[in-house]
Image (cartoon, grey):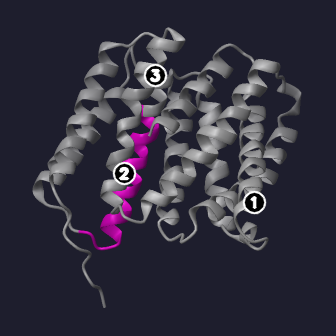
Amino acid sequence: MLAFAANSLLCRHALGHESIDPSSFASIRLLAGAIFLGLIVRLTSNRYALGSGNWISAVMLFLYVAFFSLAYLTLSAGTGALILFGTVQITMFGAGLRAGERFRPLAWIGFACAIAGFVYLLAPGAAAPPLSGAILMSIAGVAWGIYSLRGRQNLDPLAATAGNFIRAVPFALVLSMALASSAHADGVGIALAFTSGAVTSGIGYVVWYAALGSLSSLRAATVQLSVPPIAAFGGVMFLSEPVSLRLLAASAAILGGIGLVLLAKADPPVTRG
């Protein structure tokens, strides 16, 4: 979760200071992750391991990284992380229901509380985040939720993550070529994008994939909602971002809902047929 929060801080710092454009940040992030993870796989595994992963997961990874970068043109680190992982929770909770997981009343109350906080954050008003950024980050959240759910099936997290990054690179390069007229980057922007790809994304995602196998959809969704307060705190400390009363109230509702969900245990999936 620290790695996920760091991604928000790195991206927001790079874009907020206009050190790089969103498509270039996304492309360098994915390329750096692919190179770094590919080298680790080649050094620690067999030469066939890079064939792991799949195209659907790679597309979800690309969509997440691309829309994440575009959204942080207008959103603060904490607000962006709250929208991102709020959407992730909704996506993974819905997937759990579809898979037959049954949730107890306390979990439903917590989920409703979290949704209410999410809606309040996005409600129109002077303190509301920009709608365009919120929509872009919501799309990124859905893509990351699907990517996380698919990751629960991987037996080799390192190889699967490397394979997905490698497959996602061509999509990012096409995006960069399509938006080449607005491309720009200085040394700081490139360094931040590379760090986001090789360290906080590459290594962070491997750890996350490894943990997913022992988490239900509900638990995997709720654990990720610890990221927004970490990102908001980091934004205040390192980026001098303000924290609005709306963000505080929404965070309290969402995180309070998380606490209730974690107190409740999901019943086993219902067998259908």
Between disc 2 and disc 3, the foreground one is 2
Q: Can you identify the residue that label 1 sits on?
A: 43
The answer to which of 185 and 191 lies nearer the viewer is 191
Between disc 1 and disc 2, the foreground one is 1
Q: Callout 1 environment at 10 Å: few (<14), some (14 to 19), or many (20+)? A: few
Q: Give the label on residue 221, or none.
A: 2
Looking at the image, is 126 positioned above or below residue 203? above
Q: In what element is the residue under mark 1?
A: helix
Looking at the image, is 216 positioned above or below residue 271? above
Residue at 49% x, 45% y is 141
Quarter placement of the N terminus: top left
Q: Position of residue 115 (x, y in %)?
A: 28, 41
Residue at 11% x, 56% y is 105
* Range shown magenta: 82-101
Is 33 magenta? The answer is no
Q: In what element is the residue under mark 3?
A: loop
